[in-house]
Image (tube, rainbow, N blue to C red):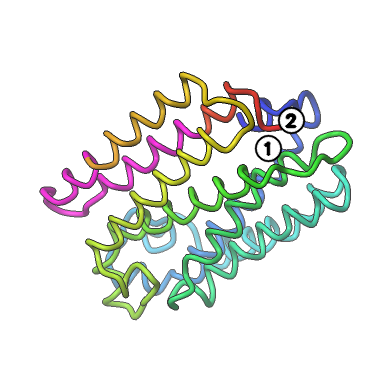
């Protein structure tokens, strides 16, 4: 959607989608390969390896193939674009190992999510430089997603020795961090581009201000895995992407 919004069409649109998909498949499959024993120990039946749906070896090979494809799929867009999407893949894998269990666990999210929209812009004909506000908004979205994504699994992670930054801060501070980073991303997207903010942008900011506290409130009163904050973050993230597309002021 973002690639279409900034002007990619035809093979270029498909190529950008394939390159980004390779990063997602790489980080997801390698993560499941690395965490297979942890997932078994915590009874994660929703994961395909401990559920017996696929072998660990198959997932590991698939992750390796997806990783090697990242620079290959980025190459048709030029050296700068290929390096940018490769940077995304490298930092995503650094999260899988070894940074997930350290106080630096948020760093791969900041770098990778900031670089993703930069790749989409650099891959355009003429290779324009991405605006700094766009990179900053992507990084803030990534940081917020990290804190929200970990929230439902804090107890399981702690039981298996994972001590990333959210685990060190605790659930309450991680919820606050997720909401604060996402709100900051929204305001960067609304007020970062040149010119006055659009009515759509102001409306998106208003929705974010309402949705994130509602997600926090629901998580505080939920039974079982607290996924409400994560869902609120995803709503705001979708609003931010739509805001980027329909304001048409990225490049």
**Pick the front one: 128 or 116:** 128
Left or right? Give the position of 129 relative to 243: right
Q: Where is residue 161? Give x, y as percent.
A: 34, 80
Q: Residue at x 46, y 56 (%)?
A: 143
**Pick the front one: 98 or 18:** 98
- Chain part drawn in magenta: 214-240
Secondary structure of the magenta portion, mostly? Answer: helix
Q: Where is residue 90? Give x, y as percent.
A: 66, 65
**Pick the front one: 47 or 15:** 15
The residue that mark 1 highlights is: 17
Q: Residue at x 28, y 57 (%)?
A: 152
Residue 239 in the magenta stretch? The answer is yes
Badge 1 element: helix
CB-based contact (under 8 Å), mark 1 and mark 2: yes
In the image, residue 49 sits, relative to residue 20, either above or below, namely: below
Neighbours of disc 2 within 10 Å: few (<14), some (14-19), many (20+):
some
Mark seen at residue 172: none
Q: Where is residue 167? Give x, y as percent.
A: 31, 71
Farthest-out residue, front: 196
In the image, residue 209 sits, relative to residue 92, either above or below, namely: above
Q: Residue at x 51, y 67 (%)?
A: 33
Residue 154 in the magenta stretch? The answer is no
The residue that mark 2 highlights is: 13
Badge 2 element: helix
């Amino acid at each position: 959607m973002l690639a279409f919004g900034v002007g990619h069409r035809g093979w270029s649109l498909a190529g950008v989608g394939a390159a980004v998909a390779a990063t997602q498949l790489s980080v997801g499959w390698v993560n499941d390969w690395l965490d297979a024993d942890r997932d078994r120990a915590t009874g994660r039946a929703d994961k395909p390896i401990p559920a017996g749906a696929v072998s660990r070896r198959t997932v590991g090979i698939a992750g390796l193939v997806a990783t090697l494809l990242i620079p290959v799929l980025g190459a048709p867009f030029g050296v700068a674009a290929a390096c940018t999407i490769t940077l995304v893949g490298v930092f995503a894998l650094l999260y899988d190992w070894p940074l997930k269990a350290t106080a630096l666990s948020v760093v791969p999210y900041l770098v990778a999510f900031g670089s993703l929209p930069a790749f989409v812009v650099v891959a355009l004909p003429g290779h324009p430089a991405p605006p700094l506000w766009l990179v900053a908004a992507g990084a803030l979205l990534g940081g917020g997603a990290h804190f929200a994504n970990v929230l439902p699994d804090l107890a399981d992670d702690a039981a298996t020795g994972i001590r990333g930054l959210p685990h060190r801060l605790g659930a309450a501070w991680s919820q606050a961090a997720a909401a604060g980073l996402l709100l900051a991303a929204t305001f960067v997207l609304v007020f970062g581009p040149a010119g006055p903010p659009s009515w759509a942008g102001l409306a998106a900011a208003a929705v974010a201000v309402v949705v994130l506290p509602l997600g926090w409130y629901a998580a505080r009163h939920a039974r079982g895995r607290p996924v409400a904050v994560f869902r609120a973050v995803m709503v705001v993230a979708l609003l931010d992407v739509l805001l980027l597309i329909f304001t048409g002021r990225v490049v």
